[in-house]
Image (spheres, helix red, strand yellow):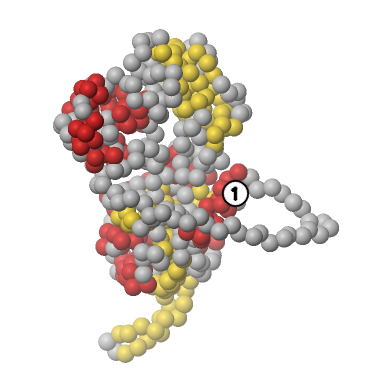
C-alpha cells in the first residue's frame, strides 16, 4: 500500500490560498480516478479537487472553513501497490513506474545529460500551465522531461478534458525516442536587482472616520496594480473612433438577436472581436516580457475586466478569440460575465490571458488610463459613446454631421511596445470599427 498526497492546487494568477468549503468524501470512502474529493473557494472562483488516483481516502488534514495555502497537503489517499506514489511529496518524486525510466537510470551520466539538454533548458515547474494537472501527472511529466507546452498539447479524457494518468502514460509510450519538448529553448533569465522598498505616507484619521480592512480580493488587486506600475513603464495612447456604423448595426440587430438567442447583444463583444482582429496583424502587442526575453503568444486570449456587485474586479478570459465568429464571441462574453457576477467561474476561466480590454463606457466615462494586467504588455480601454458634431468630407465639400464618437485608450509596456507600434495597433482597431459592415448577419 502507498499513500498519495492530495495538494491544494494553484487556482489562477495571484491566488495564494483557498478555503475548504465542503468535503465531498469522508475518511474511509473508496475513490475512483477523477472523483471530486472536496469543494474549495477563493475570492474569485469556486472549484472542486478531483482524485488523480484510485484508492481510499484515509486522512483529511483540514476542516471545512479552514484557509489553506496553495501547495499544502490537504489529504492522503491510500493506493494499491507502490507504483503510483510514494510517501515523499508527489511534486518532487521521480520514483514513478514509467516506461523508459529504468533504462534512463542505467545510462552513463554524460549520455543522459546529452539527451535531456533541451528539456532541461525549461524549468519543469508546471505552475503557469493553463489547465489543472494532478500531482501524479506532473510527477510523470517531470520524470519524462515533458515541457509545460508539451503537457498542454496532450488531449485529456478525464472530466472537463483533464489529463489523467492513463492519458500521459499513453502519450509517453507513443513518444518518439529522444523527442525534444515542444517549447523552444529559452535563454537564461537576466539577473535583476531587488526593487527598492517604498516609504508609505503617514495617514492620519479624524473623528468620525470609518476604518474598514480590505477583503482578500481587494488586497490582491491592490498588490497586483502596484506591482504592475513598478514593473512596466506605462505609456497611454488615445484615438477617437466614429462608431456610427456599429451603433446603427446593433440597433437594427439587437431585438431580433434577443428573440432568436435569448441573449442581449452588447457593444463589449464587438470591441473584443475588433481587438482580436487587430492583434492578428500586430502580434507584437500580444506578448509578455520575461527579463530580457520577449514571449510572443501563439494564442489570442482576451480578458475582459468585469465589475462585481461588491465593488471588486475580476477578469474572465475568452480563449482563442481570433478563432471564434462574432456570434461565438457574444456567447462567450455573456456566459463569462453572468457567471463572474455569481462567483461561478472555474480557475481556467480567469487565467491564461494574453491581452485585456476594459470598458469605461459601461459607467459613462469618456476614457481612462488603464493599468496593464501583468504579465501582459497592453490593455485596451473603451470609452463611452456620445453623439457629437463632426466635420465630414463629401464630394460636395465639407459638412457637419451628428455622429457617434468614442475614445479608445491603449496603455502599453514601453519596454517592448514603442509609440509607433502602439499607435498602429490602436489605429487598426479604429479602422475595423469605422468600417463595420451594417449588413452583417450574425
Compared with residue 54, is residue 177 higher up or lower down, i.e. above or below?
A: below
Residue at image coords 39%, 34%: 132
Left or right side of 156 for 29? right
Seen from this angle, which residue lies furthest left? 176
Left or right side of 266 for 65? right
Residue 115: x and y, percent? 20, 35
- Is disc 1 placed on a helix, strand or loop? helix
Residue at image coords 20%, 37%: 114
Q: Nearer the viewer, residue 341 or 399?
A: 341
Q: Nearer the viewer, residue 148 or 301?
A: 148
Residue 389: x and y, percent? 45, 81
**Quadrant of the rendered image containing residue 414:** bottom left
| Quarter of the image that includes the N terminus | top left
Q: Nearer the viewer, residue 11 or 366?
A: 11
Residue of label 1: 218
Compared with residue 405, is residue 294 higher up or lower down, i.e. above or below?
A: above
Seen from this angle, which residue lies furthest bottom? 397
Q: Residues within 10 Å of mark 1 (few under 14, many from 20)?
A: some
Compared with residue 69, is residue 377 higher up or lower down, i.e. above or below?
A: below
Residue 357: x and y, percent? 43, 58
Q: In the rendered image, is residue 100 in sight? A: no
**Quadrant of the rendered image containing residue 249:** bottom left
Compared with residue 403, is residue 375 higher up or lower down, i.e. above or below?
A: above
Q: In the rendered image, is residue 233 in sight? A: yes
Residue at image coords 41%, 39%: 127
Residue at image coords 44%, 15%: 3
Residue 356: x and y, percent? 42, 56
Amino acid at each position: 500500500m502507498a499513500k498519495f498526497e492530495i495538494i491544494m492546487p494553484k487556482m489562477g494568477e495571484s491566488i495564494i490560498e483557498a478555503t475548504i468549503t465542503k468535503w465531498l468524501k469522508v475518511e474511509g470512502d473508496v475513490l475512483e480516478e477523477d472523483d471530486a474529493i472536496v469543494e474549495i473557494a477563493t475570492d474569485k472562483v469556486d472549484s472542486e479537487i478531483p482524485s488523480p488516483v484510485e484508492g481510499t481516502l484515509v486522512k483529511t488534514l483540514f476542516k471545512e472553513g479552514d484557509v489553506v495555502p496553495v501547495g499544502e497537503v490537504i489529504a492522503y489517499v491510500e493506493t494499491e501497490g507502490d507504483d503510483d506514489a510514494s510517501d515523499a511529496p508527489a511534486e518532487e518524486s521521480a520514483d514513478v513506474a514509467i516506461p523508459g525510466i529504468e533504462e534512463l537510470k542505467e545510462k552513463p551520466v554524460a549520455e543522459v545529460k546529452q539527451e535531456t539538454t533541451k528539456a532541461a533548458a525549461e524549468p519543469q515547474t508546471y505552475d503557469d500551465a493553463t489547465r489543472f494537472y494532478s500531482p501524479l501527472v506532473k510527477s510523470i511529466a517531470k520524470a519524462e522531461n515533458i515541457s509545460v507546452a508539451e503537457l498542454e498539447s496532450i488531449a485529456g479524457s478525464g472530466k472537463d478534458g483533464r489529463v489523467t494518468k492513463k492519458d500521459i502514460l499513453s502519450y509517453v509510450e507513443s513518444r518518439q525516442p529522444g523527442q525534444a519538448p515542444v517549447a523552444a529553448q529559452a535563454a537564461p533569465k537576466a539577473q535583476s536587482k531587488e526593487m527598492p522598498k517604498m516609504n508609505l505616507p503617514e495617514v492620519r484619521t479624524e473623528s468620525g472616520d470609518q476604518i474598514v480592512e480590505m477583503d482578500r480580493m481587494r488586497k490582491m488587486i491592490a498588490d497586483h496594480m502596484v506591482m504592475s506600475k513598478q514593473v512596466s513603464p506605462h505609456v497611454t495612447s488615445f484615438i477617437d473612433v466614429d462608431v456610427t456604423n456599429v451603433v446603427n448595426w446593433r440597433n437594427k440587430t439587437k431585438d431580433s438577436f434577443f428573440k432568436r438567442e435569448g441573449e442581449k447583444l452588447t457593444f463589449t463583444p464587438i470591441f473584443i472581436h475588433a481587438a482580436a482582429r487587430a492583434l492578428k496583424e500586430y502580434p507584437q502587442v500580444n506578448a509578455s516580457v520575461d527579463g530580457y526575453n520577449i514571449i510572443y503568444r501563439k494564442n489570442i486570449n482576451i480578458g475582459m475586466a468585469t465589475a462585481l456587485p461588491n465593488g471588486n474586479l475580476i477578469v474572465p478570459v475568452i480563449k482563442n478569440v481570433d478563432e471564434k465568429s462574432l456570434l461565438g464571441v457574444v456567447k462567450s462574453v455573456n456566459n463569462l460575465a453572468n457567471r463572474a457576477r455569481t462567483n461561478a467561474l472555474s480557475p481556467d476561466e480567469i487565467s491564461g490571458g494574453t491581452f485585456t480590454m476594459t470598458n469605461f463606457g459601461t459607467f459613462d466615462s469618456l476614457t481612462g488610463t488603464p493599468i496593464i494586467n501583468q504579465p501582459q504588455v497592453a490593455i485596451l480601454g473603451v470609452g463611452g459613446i456620445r453623439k457629437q458634431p463632426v466635420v465630414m468630407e463629401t464630394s460636395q465639400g465639407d459638412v457637419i454631421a451628428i455622429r457617434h464618437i468614442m475614445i479608445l485608450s491603449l496603455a502599453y509596456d514601453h519596454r517592448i511596445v514603442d509609440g509607433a507600434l502602439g499607435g498602429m495597433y490602436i489605429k487598426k482597431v479604429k479602422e475595423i470599427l469605422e468600417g463595420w459592415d451594417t449588413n452583417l448577419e450574425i
